Amino acid sequence: MAASTEAPEPWYLALLGFAEHFRTSSPPKIRLCVHCLQAVFQFKPPPRVEARTHLQLGSVLYRHTKNSELAQTHLEKAWFISQQISQFEDVKFEAASILSEFYCQQTLVDSAKPVLRKAIQISQQTPYWHCRLLFQLAQLHALEKDLVSACDLLGMGAEYARVMGSEYTRALFLLSKGMLLLMERKLSEVHPLLTLCGTIVENWQGNPIQKESLRVFFLVLQVTHYLDAGQVKSVKPCLKQLQQCIQTISTLHDDEILPTNPAALFHWLPKEHMCVLVYLVTVMHSMQAGYLEKAQKYTDKALMQLEKLKMLDNSPILSTFQVILLEHIIMCRLVTGHKATALQEISQVCQLCQQSPRLFTNHAAQLHTLLGLYCISVNCMDNAEAQFTAALQMTTHQELWTFIVTNLASVYIREGNRHQELYSLLERINPDHNFPVSSHCLRAAAFYIRGLLSFFQGRYNEAKRFLRETLKMSNAEDLNRLTACSLVLLGHIFFVLGNHRESNNMVVPAMQLASKIPDMSVQLWSSALLKDLNKACGNTMDAHEAAQMHQNFSQQLLQDHIAACSLPEHNLISWTDGLPPVQFQPQNGPTTSLASLL
């Protein structure tokens, strides 16, 4: 048999052709494809053909069947045989890459790591595969939350790309490292790294789509860094640049010339995914700033785009984008007085998390936090406490932890009889001393919580000090919701103290801002205060108008309250452990007090 010569044997080409025909049929005929590939072994092929066929069989079985044992056997053989063959890089490193991916899917991560390490060690003369395998092992470490090892590998990749003369791939490695450092809150390392990345990106002259995609990656990191720090006003120039950048990308054609440097054959995200990501960070900004109608508009656009993409692409990142978008729009709905819709969207997040264990692991704390916020909105304070407590046990993320504690403190303040637990929480989020995070927004919210407590305790001067601090901070960064809440509470304090003029000066702008957001609870509160203020000042017409507004807001909130509590999904408020329930039992009617609304 002369199969060792360079020209492939006719029988091999015929079997390969049949296998590919069956694989690409519509629908694919995988069983026949596998038969054709298995038939290759009947001819006792040379090692190169044998290794390649094991790789093809392993890939087909892994991607298209549930026969994981056979897939593993073929992939392991492909990796073992190909290592004995020189000048056989593509098969060798593809086998290592797919075998490692397979091990990770089977939760055999400790089997994947040595394969990738060995492949990285022997691929230094093959730039494309060396970079790709470094990215793959770094991602594996990142998924295990071993961000130190992941950053080390990305640093190695950046240096290798520099030596190989690919500034583009060097920037990709450095930006990926910057993303992980941001996740670790290592801000002292992030700032010089992002500065270096900015210089590399601006100076690099190459494929326009690659250049713009680097700029999007760079600007997304900058924008999320600002938003994490609660700096809603400071982020605006970066966000505007990002939005212009994505518009530029959408006008460029994908059929640009491929890079000549094999180390540069990478791209960060498809441009359709980048568009969704830019919508997502715009929604995050709009929600934090209190532009909730804008948040709704961009969420609708992003979700529509996602639905189209998910028909063609089952990439896990699309489900992650969808969950994060829903998490933000749910918070918007609770503020705008659409609790029933928010609850249905919480149920949608539950369903998405049921389909992916990793998604649930990463978003369980956020899901319980959202349920806690929903419970507050329907005045189920015991359930809110249980949801926030569950969420606290599930997160190590400092900003989320602080957000949850702030909301749990508001629950204890409303209940009025949880002094010991409340003071214990307040010590841990003291805005004047050792505040746990650098977020401007969360620190401003902590001052508001202190002001709210002082108000309920009748310590009005102390309450005013805290609330003025909130106002100063929220005005500095355009945090509209906190501004509106602080103004209406200050207005309430001045009203109680008999200073009607000062009260009016607070309540009127609070009402205007709440209408602009729109924040239904602050509108309800402001209209009640305006009614009492005008009545006390003898302004009968204005008092009547405010009373009518208050009545309208009450009715809207009451109808929404009844609709939400009547939904079968309302039973989610009792779920605090394990995976979210699949079935919901219908409610007989609302079981919660409406006293807090009226």
Image (spheres, rainbow, N blue to C red):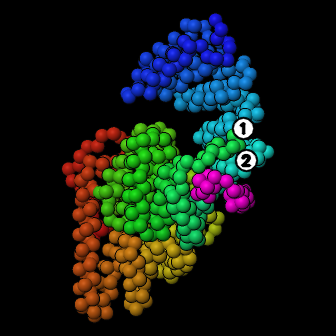
Q: Amino acid at mark 2?
A: Ser
In the rendered image of this protein, does residue 41 appear above or below residue 474? above
Residue 291 in picture, x, y percent from top left? 43, 69
**Where on the picture, by quarter, is residue 429?**
bottom right
Residue 114 in picture, x, y percent from top left? 69, 28
Distance from disc 2 to disc 1, alpha carbons, whole Å, reads 10 Å
Q: Nearer the viewer, residue 42 or 335?
A: 42
- Please report contact status of discs 2 and 1: CB closer than 8 Å, yes or no: yes
Magenta part of the protein: which range? 188-216
Q: Nearer the viewer, residue 333 or 205?
A: 205
Say which residue label 2 marks: 166
Q: Residue at x 37, y 71 (%)?
A: 518
Q: Amino acid at mark 1?
A: Pro
Residue 31 in picture, x, y percent from top left? 43, 18
Residue 275 visible in the current orientation: yes
Q: Quadrant of the N terminus?
A: top right
Please identify the residue farthest to the bottom as the structure is shown: 538
> Element under label 1?
helix
> Element under label 2?
loop
Q: Is residue 96 left or right of residue 534?
A: right
Q: Residue at x 37, y 70 (%)?
A: 519
Q: Earlier in the sequence, mark 2 or mark 1?
A: 1
In the rendered image of this protein, does residue 428 appear above or below residue 454? above
Say which residue label 1 marks: 127
Secondary structure mainly formed by the magenta segment: helix
Neighbor class of circle 1 (other Cα within 10 Å; few <14, some 14-19, many 20+) is some
Neighbor class of circle 2 (other Cα within 10 Å; few <14, some 14-19, many 20+) is many
Q: Is residue 574 left or right of residue 430?
A: left
Q: Quadrant of the C terminus?
A: bottom left
Please identify the residue farthest to the right as the structure is shown: 163
